[in-house]
Amino acid sequence: MPFLFSLTRGAGLLALAALLLPLGAAARVATGPGHPLADVVGSGPCQEFVARLPNVKSQLCADAHLLPTVGRSVQGRTLYYRDVVAPDAKIRVLVVGAMHGDELSSASLALHWIQRALETPSNAHWRFIPALNPDGLMMRPARRMNARGVDLNRNFPTPNWARDAKIYWEQRTRKDPRRWPGPSPLSEPESRYLHDEMQRFQPHLIVSIHAPYGVLDFDGPGTPPPKLGRLYLDQVGIFPGSLGNYGGVHKGMPVVTIELPSAFRTPLDAEIRQMWLDLLRWMSERVVPEDNSPRVVPVRVKTTG
């Protein structure tokens, strides 16, 4: 169903900027005084991200040129995104970081990979959401759940969610509050936003970044990648309400779940690069677009004015 929304002049330029930014390591946005994008970009999340995230310097975050969406967290924080589109893009890849707020390195890796995508976009239209759970990320100490205490990675509408999520939480986790699936599927604004974004973007691949188990997981159709850098495939099963279960198993959108070795430290830069190259190599061999892919609806951006 098409989404109808109006954009002011500034917001219209925002949407265009996301798609028209030049590809390459030297890509920049002019945001001097009086520029239509200056106020929006200048008031973005970089100050908080740089203060909070490991291995994220001001220039890296500024170069990411994150743009606001209509998505909001429970506490009203804006959810940010960045599109990087290769000139010959044939597949769509959605990358999600910090679904769990205490996995700080996951948001850092997403920001580093935005830079990698600008340098080597391959044949993809990339859409990055570096921090799906900003409330949990910015708490002191950071916590896995969102501000309502819900584990967002148990809140997606998998079949029989009402029965299976309850049984899993009560019997398998013994009501672990860190894994509470919420009162109902998609009860949380963050999970609803990602669910709607999957409908809009129709990705051929979802990459969900987590920590700290140091493995690679995969859900959905197709052949999984054997490794990304030093992370090797070790499929850990599926859980009621998880993104891998919902997107990979039930929606047919393959989900690669990266479990970094540490929640508080990123891999070395050389390892980040190797993981990216391994992902591109696997995508070129295994992720094949469908000829009848539906039309992609643009990101719903935050309006100004």
Image (cartoon, rainbow, N blue to C red):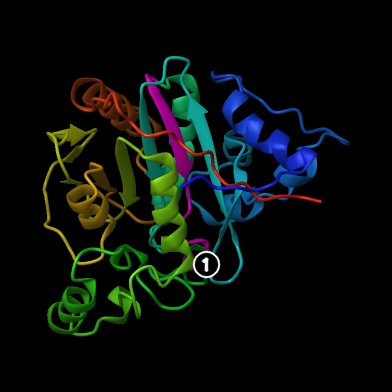
Q: Residue at x 12, y 34 (%)?
A: 223
Q: In x, y percent, where is residue 123?
A: 37, 19
Q: Secondary structure at mark 1?
A: helix
Dot 1 crowding, Cα within 10 Å, few <14, some 14–19, many 20+? many
Relative to residue 115, is residue 42 drawn left or right? right
Numbered range of the magenta stretch? 122-136
> Viewer-proximal residue, 136 or 20?
20
80 falls in the magenta region:
no
| Residue on which the image places disc 1 | 135
The relative height of residue 303 versus residue 35 in the rendered view (above or below) is: below
Residue type, mark 1 in image: Asp
Query: Farthest residue in the front direction?
Result: 1
Q: In x, y percent, where is residue 239?
A: 18, 64
Relative to residue 216, is residue 276 drawn left or right? right
Q: In x, y percent, where is residue 126?
A: 43, 32
The relative height of residue 122 versus residue 4 in the rendered view (above or below) is: above
> Viewer-proximal residue, 206 or 144?
206
> Viewer-proximal residue, 73 or 110?
73
Identify the image quadrant of residue 266: top left
The relative height of residue 89 versus residue 142 in the rendered view (above or below) is: above
133 falls in the magenta region:
yes
Q: Residue at x 36, y 21 (%)?
A: 90
Q: In x, y percent, where is residue 136?
A: 47, 67
